[in-house]
Image (spheres, rainbow, N blue to C red):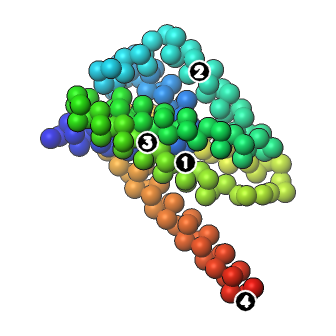
Amino acid sequence: MTTWIWAIGRLCGVSVSAGLRASMTLLILGVLSREGWGFHAAPGFGWLESSEAIAVLVVLTILEIAFDKVPSLDRLSARLTAPWRLTAGAIAGGASMPHSAPGLAVGLAGGAALALLGLCAKRLWRPRSTTGTMTLPLLSLVEDLVAFAAAVLSATLPPIGYAVGVWTGWFVLRLRRRRVAKYQGLRVLSR
């Protein structure tokens, strides 16, 4: 029972992180698993540790981070990479649940759902338009640091994954309420 509690905590943190930075999260899991630094990929996900997978994930991470910093490509990049982020969340969730078929099912489904939560947080946090040229690159840098910290800490210290998941859920609810209140006020004025 205790192993399920730890695994679900790890699942929460790495899957939310994959919703922010998919390739970086998988790269971190692959490196941690390969080096034996507090995380071991579930059976069937050993390919994350291979040199080829790590090399591909390094290139994808660099591209993902670079394209996210370009304001003119921000919206297009977010829409095009959404399926990849959900898939990476499912992969990260599956790799963090070492309990054969039931663990794999929980990991894949929960990982994709929590990656969607991370993706919603990113989408709600970013402004729809901005006049400053440094706003989006700075927000993107904060996302990079949060995703890195969430992935490393959740993979090595699973209880932190629960905190990451709860905080992200609270953050999404708060931003949605603020956005609804903002636009609801506009609807009242238009009548």
Q: Quick check: 63 left or right of 33? A: right
Q: Position of residue 86 (x, y in %)?
A: 50, 40
The disc labelled 4 sits on which kind of residue?
Answer: Arg
The disc labelled 2 sits on which kind of residue?
Answer: Val
Residue in the image at 33% along x and 37% along y? 107
Point out the frontmost of discs 1 and 2: 1
Point out the frontmost of discs 4 and 3: 4
Instruction: Pick the quarter of the image with the N terminus.
Output: top left
**Mark 2, residue position:** 58
Say above or below: 30 vs 12. above
Cα distance, mark 1 to mark 4? 34 Å
Name the element at disc 4: loop
Residue positioned most to the top: 51
Q: Which mark is residue 119?
A: 1
Earlier sequence position, callout 4 versus callout 3:
3
Earlier sequence position, callout 1 versus callout 3:
3
Q: Quadrant of residue 184?
A: bottom right
Disc 4 crowd, CA 10 A, few/some/many (<14, 14-19, 20+)? few
Q: Quick check: 85 left or right of 72? A: left
Earlier sequence position, callout 3 versus callout 2:
2
Point out the frontmost of discs 2 and 4: 4
Q: Which mark is residue 191?
A: 4
Disc 3 crowd, CA 10 A, few/some/many (<14, 14-19, 20+)? many
Earlier sequence position, callout 2 versus callout 4:
2
Cα distance, mark 4 to mark 3? 41 Å
Earlier sequence position, callout 1 versus callout 4:
1
